[in-house]
């Protein structure tokens, strides 16, 4: 009977004790991924983050948002600025701005950030995070080869809890002082102001200088130690939470016999509002609210900025101190902001302003600004809980003017138009000058051509040739060769008539030119002391009646071939060839004479023929810029076998 009375009284005391705990249990029904919670932390805006197997969850007081971590088993969770640091069984992972970055590593047991440097304690030594990989640190082989269970920094020294001992180091990067404080499988190191407490399989130790003093042998299998309301809360794997006073005397137990649904506790966390969060192995998450009525100063942060409905994720919006430059078409800007109040999320109110006056307080957590004009803007937001207001946050941005409104563009446009107008006027003047110059050049060319035509007309008939023909006619009359006389007179008359008629025209048909050349060559054959043969050939793509050519263009070259090329040979031969090629008329005059260089030396009558050839060459070259003329000796080995005159002129037709 006494025994049952004792149990009844003990149960009553437990119930009374439990009533002092304002506990709330979050399970899968409330939105957490599963009942196993391994680690808890809080970010700068007050949101609670917790790790559960292969997921992380964010709790803002109203709902849990869950994120999958690439099917990795999570061991520890820490916060650094706006980033979440995650230790898993085979990687170190960073979650920032909605993206995961994974770094392959050994199993991660602890994470420590000191002066911006991230250290990672693994199952085999300590690593430092570089830009894109983990670099192992070299301290001591007893540390580098062992499991690192915990890492802490007191402002001067690092405390390293390994599965073999507890160490004190002055510098992890370049250690100069490394002391082993105590041997044993140390699981945790906790630093509370100037008090350092560590735990291993024996119990709790107080660290003073470089010595460890055993202060309590209970509880066992410690997973975490936190100082809450001037008491030490010690989480264990098998006996729930043991609460000790500052002198390490026992105060109470929080376990499955009085409050919790399990004795297997993974970690304890105290948030900014003095709530205590308890992560269990199999009973989900517990929240213990204190009786404190004090409202902490809220913290507001920007959660997102959209520019024309696109998130601005290229910068850290809460750390951006510059002025964001936006083009004129990016003038629709939206801001989202948030203050987390875990205990009473609906008590948060917000207000904002764009450059000028604050808006009224509201619960709305976002605002859109559409069709903003060009100029400088400062967006400011502020929150409050009850009557306690947060520090305002600001974000500055600048919307550029459209191109057509910019002063430099308007001045440039005015200058450009002025320049264009000047260029148009200058171009007009130059065109007039060019036109006048072209007219002058044309007149000069026409005058020159006219002069050449006059010279050509004067040189078309060699007086010596006319004298020879007349003497020949006289000789034929004396000998009584009336038939030959009549033919010669007829040919000579036809030649003279052709020369006179053609000299009055700028162009004649190729057939007329060939007919005139035949008459001339036949007369030369009759008058020549040494007989010669001639041949006029054509290879034309157009009928010779339709091709136009300046009159008497070939006669001076043929006359030169007869008088100075083949005159001294008995078997002289002249070949004239007309061809068409690529809109050009080409003419070749070949003779088998002594060559023009030798003929120059032997000729006694140079003046008429040399002038005639030169004038005709100028006529050809002045017909067009595309006209070409050449004269060369024909060689066979080293011997001269004749002369070739070749030229091409643009092909002209009478249609």
Image: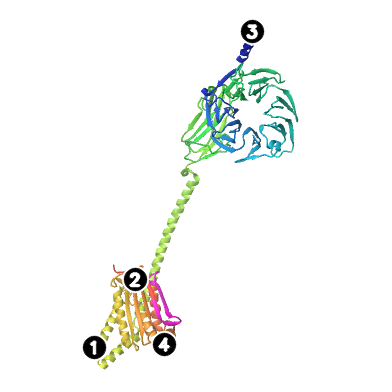
Residue of label 2: 580
Q: Position of residue 618 (x, y in %)?
A: 40, 75
Residue annotated with mark 1:
483
Q: Earlier in the sequence, mark 3 or mark 1?
A: 3
Q: Which comes sooner in the sequence, label 4 or label 1?
A: 1
Please name whichever residue, 25 or 415, is drawn nearer the observer in this view of the structure.
25
Query: Of tags 3 and 4, which is closer to the observer?
Result: 3
**Do the numbered discs 3 and 4 sit on residues whose CB atoms are within 8 Å?**
no
Mark 3 or 1: the one toward you: 3
Rounded to the nearest angstrom, the CA distance separating label 2 from label 3 is 136 Å
* Residue holding disc 4: 604
What residue is drawn where x is 39% and y is 77%?
645
Q: Is residue 642 magenta?
A: yes
Q: Which residues are magenta?
A: 622-645
Question: What is the quadrant of residue 529 in the picture?
Answer: bottom left
- Residue labelled with disc 3: 5
Q: Residue 160 appears in which quarter of the rendering?
A: top right
Colouring of the image: rainbow
In the foreground, 268 or 569: 268
Do the residues under discs 4 and 1 have CB atoms within 8 angstroms?
no
């Amino acid at each position: 009977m006494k025994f049952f009375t004792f149990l009844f009284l003990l149960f009553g005391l437990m119930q009374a004790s439990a009533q002092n705990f304002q506990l709330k249990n979050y399970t899968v029904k409330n939105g957490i991924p599963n009942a196993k919670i391994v680690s808890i932390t809080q970010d700068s805006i007050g949101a609670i983050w917790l790790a559960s197997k292969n997921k992380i969850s964010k709790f803002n007081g109203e709902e849990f948002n869950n994120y999958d971590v690439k099917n990795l088993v999570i061991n520890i969770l820490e916060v650094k600025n706006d980033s979440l640091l995650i230790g898993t069984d085979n990687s170190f992972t960073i979650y920032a701005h909605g993206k995961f970055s994974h770094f392959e590593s050994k199993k991660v047991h602890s994470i420590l950030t000191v002066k911006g440097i991230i250290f990672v304690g693994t199952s085999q030594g300590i690593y430092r995070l570089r830009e894109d990989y983990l670099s192992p640190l070299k301290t001591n082989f007893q540390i580098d080869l062992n499991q690192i269970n915990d890492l802490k920094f007191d402002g001067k020294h690092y405390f390293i809890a390994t599965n073999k001992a507890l160490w004190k180091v002055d510098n992890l990067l370049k250690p100069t002082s490394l002391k082993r404080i105590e041997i044993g499988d140390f699981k945790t190191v906790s630093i509370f102001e100037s008090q350092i407490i560590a735990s291993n399989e024996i119990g709790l130790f107080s660290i003073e200088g470089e010595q460890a003093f055993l202060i309590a042998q209970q509880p066992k299998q410690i997973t975490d130690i936190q100082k809450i309301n001037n008491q030490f809360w010690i989480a264990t794997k098998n006996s729930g939470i043991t609460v000790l006073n500052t002198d390490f005397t026992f105060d109470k137990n929080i376990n499955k016999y009085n409050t919790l649904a399990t004795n297997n506790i993974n970690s304890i966390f105290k948030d900014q509002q003095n709530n205590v969060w308890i992560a269990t192995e199999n009973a989900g998450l517990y929240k213990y609210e204190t009786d404190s009525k004090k409202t902490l100063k809220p913290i507001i942060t920007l959660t997102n900025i959209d520019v024309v409905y696109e998130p601005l994720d290229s910068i850290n919006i809460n750390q951006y101190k510059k002025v964001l430059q936006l083009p004129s078409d990016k003038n629709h800007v939206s801001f989202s902001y948030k203050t987390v109040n875990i205990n009473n999320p609906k008590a948060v109110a917000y207000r904002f302003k764009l450059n000028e006056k604050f808006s009224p307080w509201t619960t709305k957590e976002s605002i859109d600004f559409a069709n903003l004009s060009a100029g400088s803007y400062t967006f400011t937001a502020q929150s409050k809980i009850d009557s306690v207001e947060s520090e305002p946050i600001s974000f500055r941005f600048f919307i550029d003017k459209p191109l057509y409104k910019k002063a430099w563009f308007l001045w440039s446009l005015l200058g450009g138009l002025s320049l264009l107008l000047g260029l148009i006027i200058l171009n007009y003047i130059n065109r007039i000058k060019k036109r006048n110059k072209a007219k002058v050049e044309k007149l000069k060319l026409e005058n020159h051509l006219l002069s050449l035509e006059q010279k050509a007309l004067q040189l078309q008939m060699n007086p010596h040739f006319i004298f020879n023909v007349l003497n020949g006619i006289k000789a034929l009359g004396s000998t009584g060769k009336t038939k030959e006389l009549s033919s010669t007179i007829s040919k000579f008359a036809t030649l003279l008539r052709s020369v006179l008629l053609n000299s009055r025209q700028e162009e004649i048909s190729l057939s007329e030119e060939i007919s005139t050349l035949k008459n001339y060559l036949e007369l030369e054959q009759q008058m020549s002391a040494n007989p010669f043969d001639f041949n006029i050939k054509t290879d034309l793509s157009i009928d010779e009646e339709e091709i136009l050519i300046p009159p008497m263009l070939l006669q001076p070259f043929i006359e030169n071939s007869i008088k100075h090329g083949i005159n001294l040979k008995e078997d002289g031969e002249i070949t004239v060839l007309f061809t068409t090629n690529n809109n050009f008329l080409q003419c070749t005059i070949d003779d088998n004479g002594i060559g023009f260089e030798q003929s120059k030396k032997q000729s006694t009558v140079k003046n008429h023929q040399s002038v005639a050839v030169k004038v005709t060459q100028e006529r050809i070259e002045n017909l067009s810029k595309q006209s070409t003329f050449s004269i060369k000796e024909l060689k066979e080995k080293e011997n001269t076998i004749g002369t070739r005159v070749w030229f091409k002129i643009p092909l002209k037709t009478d249609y």
